[in-house]
Image (cartoon, helix red, strand yellow):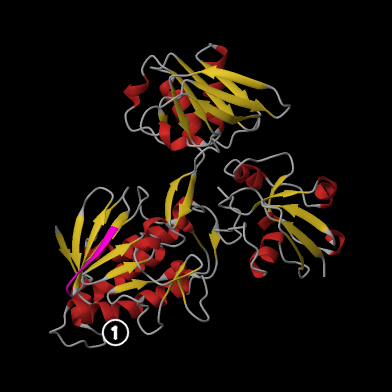
Amino acid sequence: MIKTDAVVVGAGPVGLFAVFELGILGLNAHVIDNLDKAGGQCIELYPDKPIYDIPAVPECTGESLTQSLLKQIKPFKTNFHFNQRVEKLEKNKDHWLVTTSDQVQFQTSNIIIAAGVGSFEPRKPPIKNIERFEKTNLFYAVKDKNKFKDQTVCIFGGGDSALDWTVELSKIAKKIILIHRRDEFRAAQHTVSLARDLEKKGKAEILTSYQPLDFVGDTNIENVKIKHDNGDQRDLKVDSVLAFFGLKMELGPIANWGLDLEAKSLKVETKSFQTNENGIFAIGDICTYPGKLKLILSGFHEGALCAQECFKRARPDEKYVFRFTTSSSDIQKRLGVK
Amino acid sequence: MPKVTYIEYNGKEHEVEVEKGLSIMEGAVQNGIQGIDADCGGACACATCHIYVKEEWLDKLSEQSESEKDMLDFAFETKSNSRLSCQLMLDDKHDGIVVNLPEKQG
């Protein structure tokens, strides 16, 4: 059980800046995110796209913004818990118990939900009851590539993951069948030509303009049925299936925590951005209140205000004093500049 | 103002007037039409504003950019008339356009 002043759910820009605002008040935080790195939508959806409305930063990208924020919170040596999401929240007197999908547990007086549109989950192919194959031979990521040794592996997708694994697994698999919905691939052109070479050598079969129609089998996928744009169907015998259709965002367990929701957003008051539960805050895109703007800069403001209330809850016996970073020696010590 | 008809997957039709210069996605969101999520807010980065455009309107729309084609890889059950509605800006020539919404987004 980890004891901490605050648990921040979501490592996007707003979650990261909340860590900063907590940090300068002397509060430590643990950050949980379902992705494998910090940045949230900025890093997962638009790392290269320009952003022009961050105050005093005329132009940046999702990636550079994330890097700057990580640099800004570096002095606080924040603990990140990636590749997991919060599954359970329980109230225990005046604090909260938080449990993640990897069974990591936290005890805290403050939970800051900065989860954007929700956690990133793999996008699944449109096959009915697809879940029954997820424990056997259908995968959305490769954890242990040796599993695919001497197998006929069917890979869906046209991006870097699909093409990279086509090339990599072809070294140990019996055969790779790569299926994509159109002739062009998004993946790096170099990898695409490597895959085309494998096709010529007979190590890989590349089927384009096909989409998945059905996965046949009881608990194991035995056959994959695919359909060409012209209506032709094919039936492929496979040992395992890798589906790389990217990630989508889902609110997930947050909807079950007893918090007031409006559409897919959490309702908060605008003094400290607290939800209907004491000690649970929502900031950034996931919160809503009259006049809410879904801008990164609004999330920064919300984080600053909620950190003040977090201080009062985490340090009920200490007096809260507002200080500027420019002149406070305490804050500067925390930032490691003095 | 161009009139747009959104047809939900269950057949429910919504005919609304959308201001010129807005996208078909924005028209749906502003009018509270279910079935277009637009998670990324119109940055052509998430494929959750996927629609099917009634065939006769296809050639009146702007060409698909490479990034829209790339993003459509992520949409649920794409067809030849699939588009991302955040990329479709409305003009007078689109008055009367009809779009169908997919079974689900992503």
Magenta-drawn stretch, dominant element (helix, strand or loop): strand
Q: Is residue A90 magenta?
A: yes
x, y percent for residue A251: 43, 58
Residue A282 placement: quadrant? bottom left
Assign the C terminus of chain A to one quadrant of the image. bottom left
Q: Is residue B83 left or right of residue A102?
A: right
User: Residue at left 83%, top 47%?
Assistant: B59
Query: Along the line of sight, which residue is nearer the eye, A281 or A56?
Result: A281
A298 in relation to A101, above or below: below
Q: Is residue A299 magenta?
A: no
x, y percent for residue A71: 32, 61
Element carrying mark 1:
loop
Query: Along the line of sight, which residue is nearer the eye, A219 or B5?
Result: A219
Residue A157 in sight: yes
- Mark 1: which amino acid? Phe
User: Residue at left 21%, top 52%?
Assistant: A104
Assign the N terminus of chain A to one quadrant of the image. bottom left
Circle 1 marks a residue in which chain?
Answer: A
Magenta segment boundaries in residue numbering: A88-93
